Image (cartoon, rainbow, N blue to C red):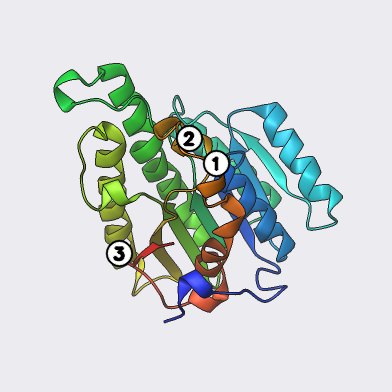
Amino acid sequence: MTEIKSYQPAADILKHRTILITGATGGIGSAVAKSCAAHGASIILLDKTIPKLEKLYDEIEQTGHPQPAIIPADLAGATPADYETVIATIEKEFGHLDGLLHCAAFLGNRSPIEQYNLEEWNKSMQVNLTAPFLLTRACLPLLKKSADASVVFTTAQVGRHGKAYWGAYGIANAAVENMMQILADEVENNTNIRANSIDPGAVHTGLWVKVFPGVDPKTWVEPGDVVNGFVYLLGPDSKGVSGKQFSL
């Protein structure tokens, strides 16, 4: 298996691939979207803030890479019907999907379970767990149309080993890891779909700055430093790799 931390993708490794990215305007989501576009993919940008989506769209388009598409959606309040609308739009414009990357995340305030805010619990479960489930389920028919499709769940170390005060975020990530393994097992023998999870580690994003506000920004790993791992899992070089938990 390729060493994901040192992977260097070929320039056109994602040419002719269509990839949907949630949380596309976030630190990691936007960096991966730009990198995937630079490697030839047509990117569908999904996030809740239209001005940020339009800014990212312009940045990708101005580079001369494949023109992206925008789908505004707030995962915190999206219903199953909303996901069906998203899929109908993608099917009309692209016909299929080669990749689905879940980058959207909601942390909330860290606190003991005894004092955990129920509203934040529900929002965290909705964004971090229910939304990836509903979107993945809705996307499967389009992914099955691809000759080589990849579903990638962005998770965290606290989803693989629980730690105090990480509450719903850690619990949701643990469930996502299990969902990934279940999906990988279900699609292994009868489709061209593979599923994996990736923990990018402590990256200089808004989420991690909120967790560790006193850390010197110069010590952070930047989003651009981890994008190649995502490109590997979304591209053909990881074909046949499924059900695995990766760390960067």
Q: Which residue is mark 3?
A: 186
Q: Earlier in the sequence, mark 3 or mark 2?
A: 3
**Distance between mark 2 and mark 1 Cα atoms:** 9 Å
Q: Residues within 10 Å of mark 1 (few under 14, many from 20)?
A: few
Toward which corner of the image does residue 132 lie, by quadrant? top left
Q: Judging from the image, what secondary structure is the residue with disc 2 in?
A: helix
Horizontal side of residue 175 vs 232, given as left or right: left
Q: Which residue is mark 1?
A: 217
Which residue is most to the bottom?
A: 1
Q: Residues within 10 Å of mark 2 (few under 14, many from 20)?
A: some
Res 42 seen here: no
Horizontal side of residue 222 vs 181, given as left or right: right
Amino acid at the residue labelled 2: Val
Residue at x 26% of width, y 46% of height? 175
Horizontal side of residue 17 vs 67, given as left or right: left
Amino acid at the residue labelled 3: Glu
CB of mark 3 within 8 Å of CB of mark 1?
Answer: no
Foreground mark, 3 or 2, reads: 2
Which residue is most to the left?
A: 114
Q: Nearer the viewer, residue 3 or 1?
A: 3
Residue at x 45% of width, y 24% of height? 77
**Distance between mark 3 and mark 1 Cα atoms:** 42 Å
Amino acid at the residue labelled 1: Pro
Q: Quadrant of the C terminus?
A: bottom left
Q: Which residue is mark 2?
A: 209
